[in-house]
Image (cartoon, rainbow, N blue to C red):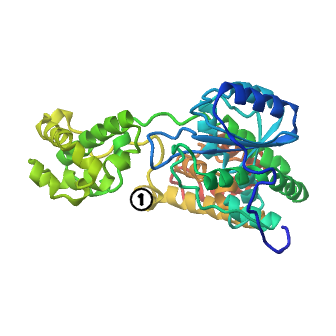
Amino acid sequence: MTEERTVEPLLEPRDGIPAVIADATGLAEVVARFAAGSGPVAVDAERASGYRYGNRAYLVQLRRAGAGTALIDPIGCPDLSALDEAVADAEIVLHAASQDLPCLMEVGFKPRVMFDTELAGRLLGYERVGLGTMVETVLGLRLEKGHSAADWSTRPLPEDWLRYAALDVEVLVELRDVLHQELTESGKLDWAREEFAAVLDTPPPSPRSDPWRRTSGIHKVRNVRALAIVRELWTMRDRIAREADLAPGRVLPDAAIVTAALEGPRTKKALTEISAFTGRSARKHMSDWLAAVARARNLPDNQLPQPSTPGDGPPPPNRWADRDPAAAKRLAAARAVVAALAEEHHMPTENLLQPDAVRRLTWEPPAEITEESVTDRLRELGAREWQLSLAAAPISKALARLGTRGEL
């Protein structure tokens, strides 16, 4: 790891704050600059999570040697495919890439080769891997992180926000270079490359069949008629939020949905007595909320939602001891192996081997436990080759000592 150094505040971009590009002419100039630049391209994106519906990008920042920094408004420039093509052969440097890749791909920017500085930090054993902390720890520079949760759909964007955005890519390539060297020296560079490729290859998640079941606090709702109220209110809120381009929680908080489900208000007065319905946005739609509650109340029994839907994986581990004691022992044994290996290689357990893969393997192990069968199963579950080379043999030995499918 890098040794401690004096921390210097990074207050201004070295080339000043660039103008925001919001039209085709400006974008064409950026494309030409970045095509003529050299080396990796630092990229970041700002969203308006918590303010707007969805997770689209409202600002895209890039920096490359010989090209400088560009700030692009993807509302005015919704198609960045020409820029993507201009840097197609370059390594794209991101921090916490899985957060930004979906919104970048929406505007046509799809990295082929990537370096994720957050993921590199995890593999190297850094305890804190936020961008600001990594830049401070590795480069001795302090970034101002005051606007990370801002409403980036704001127009025009304030100058101090633009300064923050430009600084986010100012030293990202420098951070990449130091981490690349540390990965090389620790023998983890090939591991990192596999991880980066896996992130790029991960398809977007499939839409949830019952997204309303993710309502915070729904565990308090145990009556199926009340669950129907949650479903109807959630669906109504989602429609209103989508049409208004607002984050659903700004239209009606989850707490309001759960409280209404528990109390089943029948009148507008009863609804207004629920404190979470007193917000300005919620008050605008009182008739919609009452209609949703009434629909749920009038549903025939055969259309009511069931208390829960079976998942496609094993149950929560805290239930294993009761449902399948043998599986619980297998899980404990496999987790112990992973924890020991993670400590040996100085990284979090979840990066050494995905927890979901460990759970699925131990809940339904191969009929015959061998290193080959465990390797094949973990590979099916998404484990990378470097993870298999470390973990498959010791996990198979630990499971073989216990037996399989209830044989202890």
Residue at the (50%, 59%) spot, across then down? 328
Q: Is residue 259 left or right of residue 92?
A: left
As rendered, which of 128 and 205 lies closer to the eye? 128
The residue under label 1 is: 319
- Image position of 369 (left or right of 253): right
Image coords of residue 288 (percent x, y): 20, 39
Judge left or right: residue 408 versus residue 94. Answer: left
Above or below 345: residue 46: above
The location of residue 253, given as percent across then percent down, is 32, 52
Say whether residue 254 is left or right of residue 53.
left
Q: Residue at x 76, y 51 (%)?
A: 16
**Residue located at (54% from left, 38% from top):** 56
SS under mark 1: helix
Q: x%, y% of residue 138?
A: 80, 64
Quadrant assignment for the N terminus: bottom right
Residue 345 percent across, percent down from the top left: 78, 63
Is residue 191 in view from this perspective?
A: yes
